[in-house]
């Protein structure tokens, strides 16, 4: 597992008051009326959001209660705070629990079921992976700097597939990894590209056609074969040259640049592709919109490197399995 400085700093967090303030700031997007409370007599309420139709902010009937925890035994903490809230007579409709610990999918489902069956409560549970994704998102880097003391240069540029998936989930993109209807052909072509002598391919498709979902699914399958490690490049990175050490020159890589039209360091990327350490070990996919693909191709051609193309059609255009054959890689 790749070391991540954000998660390491979160694991070291000991200031409960600062953690409550940080979490409240991170949740404003989903809960714009959140009100931090904190203190030793908060009665299980580190923060609240009252129902919009009520004048009371005590969430004694409806509304949302928030609890932020640094305890390693987060499950016991959650159960204690839920019990405390209802002992004091509060009746929220939703309980939001944020922990700096890792929550497995099994424990996530079990905790939500427990809260619903015992208290009739909608439990929203956010763990260290959510915290990391939110803090490393461009809109929240100032909070990461303020509470963790980390600037942008400490962010990884080459993200593992699961790390990129969590990041996109937090940004409300690529909400799942479904089985793709009509995408088997494209996945097979990407798998073939990853073991070919080709180096660069441009994947183009209109917004909403499922480019990111396709890339995540293809990455998962390729990693399952063991032929390549897959890394997604963080497109808003100020520089990638200083992060080449994140890649092991003994491994084969498929690099994926999603939203490539937002990237500005193609010369550095080309230097990586043609470097003696990696020129035999790297394949690169550039994902973009149709109106940007020609600009990307020209950018690489200007630097002396040609690109293949893969055009993505809407799944709704496919009426049967054979229709997939109309989508193909064009070689240059």
Image (spheres, rainbow, N blue to C red):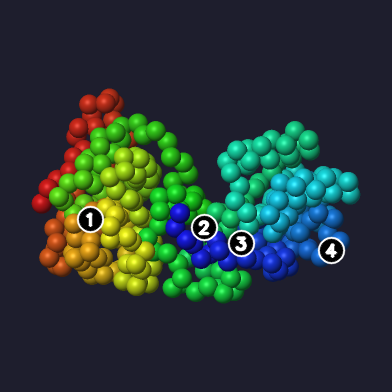
* Label 4 or label 3, whichever comes before in sequence order: 3
Mark sitting on residue 111: none
* Label 3 or label 1, whichever comes before in sequence order: 3
* Label 4 or label 1, whichever comes before in sequence order: 4
- Judge the density around disc 4: few (<14), some (14-19), many (≥20) Cα neighbours within 10 Å: few
Q: Secondary structure at mark 1?
A: loop
- Judge the density around disc 3: few (<14), some (14-19), many (≥20) Cα neighbours within 10 Å: some
- The residue indicated by pointer 4 is 40
Mark sitting on residue 11: 3
Q: Write down the quadrant of residue 110 in the picture.
A: top right
* Label 2 or label 1, whichever comes before in sequence order: 2
- The residue indicated by pointer 2 is 133
Q: Residue drawn 12% across and 48% down?
A: 331
Q: Which tag is nearer the camera, tag 4 or tag 1? A: 1
| Marks 3 and 1, how far apart at CA | 35 Å
- Judge the density around disc 2: few (<14), some (14-19), many (≥20) Cα neighbours within 10 Å: many
Q: Residue drawn 22% across and 26% down?
A: 322
Q: Residue drawn 71% across and 46% down?
A: 75
Mark sitting on residue 281: 1
| Marks 4 and 3, how far apart at CA | 23 Å
């Amino acid at each position: 597992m790749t070391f991540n400085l954000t998660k390491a700093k979160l694991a070291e967090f000991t200031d409960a008051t600062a953690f409550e303030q940080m979490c409240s700031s991170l949740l404003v997007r989903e809960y714009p009326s959140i009100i931090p409370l904190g203190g030793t007599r908060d009665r299980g309420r580190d923060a609240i959001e009252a129902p919009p139709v009520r004048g009371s902010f005590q969430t004694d009937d409806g509304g949302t209660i928030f609890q932020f925890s640094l305890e390693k035994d987060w499950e016991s903490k959650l159960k204690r705070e839920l019990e405390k809230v209802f002992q004091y007579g509060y009746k929220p409709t939703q309980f939001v629990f944020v922990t700096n610990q890792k929550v497995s999918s099994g424990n996530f489902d079990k905790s939500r079921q427990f809260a619903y069956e015992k208290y009739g409560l909608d439990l929203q549970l956010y763990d260290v992976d959510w915290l990391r994704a939110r803090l490393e998102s461009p809109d929240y880097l100032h909070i990461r700097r303020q509470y963790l003391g980390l600037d942008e240069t400490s962010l990884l540029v080459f993200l593992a597939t699961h790390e990129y998936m969590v990041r996109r989930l937090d940004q409300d993109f690529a909400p799942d990894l479904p089985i793709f209807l009509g995408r088997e052909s494209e996945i097979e072509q990407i798998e073939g590209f990853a073991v070919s002598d080709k180096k660069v391919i441009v994947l183009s498709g209109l917004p909403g056609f499922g480019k990111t979902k396709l890339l995540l699914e293809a990455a998962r399958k390729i990693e399952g074969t063991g032929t390549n490690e897959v890394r997604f490049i963080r497109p808003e990175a100020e520089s990638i040259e200083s992060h080449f050490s994140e890649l092991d020159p003994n491994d084969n890589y498929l690099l994926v640049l999603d939203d490539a039209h937002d990237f500005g360091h193609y010369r550095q990327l080309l230097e990586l592709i043609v470097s003696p350490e990696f020129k035999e070990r790297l394949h690169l996919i550039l994902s973009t919109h149709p109106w940007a693909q020609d600009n990307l191709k020209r950018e690489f051609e200007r630097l002396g490197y040609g690109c293949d193309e893969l055009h993505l059609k809407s799944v709704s255009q496919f009426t049967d399995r054979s229709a997939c054959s109309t989508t193909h890689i064009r070689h240059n």
